[in-house]
Image (cartoon, helix red, strand yellow):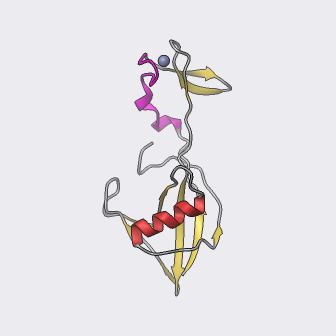
Amino acid sequence: MVIFQVGFRYQIDRNYSMSHLEFCSNCGEKNILGKIDGGNRYHCLHCKTIHYENPKPTSTLICVKENKLLLVKRAVEPGKGLWGLPGGFIELNETPDEGAIRELKEETNLDAVVNCQLGYTCHYNTMHGD
Ligand SMILES: [Zn+2]
């Protein structure tokens, strides 16, 4: 089986995110969206906490064997029943390759070696909505 890791997905579209940060996680006061620390960010005027929006890196795999592409069917929401490429969120202290291998094992029980990384993309995650 030839395995290519197609890279990372980042959500970057602020229009759909951060509604859960209406209130400051540090002091509970209402956050505002405005210019601070070089960007337009949610922050708290009361305790001065800046709520940075950080990407959630994922690994997605293209697994090919004998001209067949491995797809997985989602077993859980969101998107339960939909077909897609194997992959998922990279966990703390994992490299992208380690995350890809772990996700493939979890989803298919297949062992893998990543042959190459094809690249990365940044986009809003429509499935998870965050
Ligand atoms: Zn605060």
Residue 102 percent location from the top left of the image: 48, 64
Residue 9 percent location from the top left of the image: 55, 53
Would you place residue 23 above or below residue 18 in this image? Answer: above
Camera-nearest residue between 77 and 105:
105
Seen as rendered, the residue at the extreme top is 46
Residue 26 percent location from the top left of the image: 46, 22
Quarter of the picture containing the C terminus is: top left
Query: Magenta segment, principal secondary structure?
Result: loop
Seen as rendered, the residue at the extreme right is 38
Camera-nearest residue between 40 and 49:
49
Q: Splitting the image into 4 quarters, where does residue 5 fall?
A: bottom right
Seen as rendered, the residue at the extreme front is 93
Please report the residue visible at 42 percent of the width from the left and 31 percent of the height from the top: 19
Q: How many labels does the image show?
A: 0
Residue 60 visible in the picture: no
Q: Splitting the image into 4 quarters, where does residue 106 fall?
A: bottom left
- Is residue 24 magenta-colored? yes
Would you place residue 91 above or below residue 108 in this image? Answer: above
- Is residue 96 magenta-colored? no
Please report the residue visible at 47 percent of the width from the left and 20 percent of the height from the top: 31
Residue 92 visible in the picture: yes
Quarter of the picture containing the N terminus is: bottom right
Residue 34 percent location from the top left of the image: 57, 21
Q: Give the range drawn in magenta.
A: 14-29
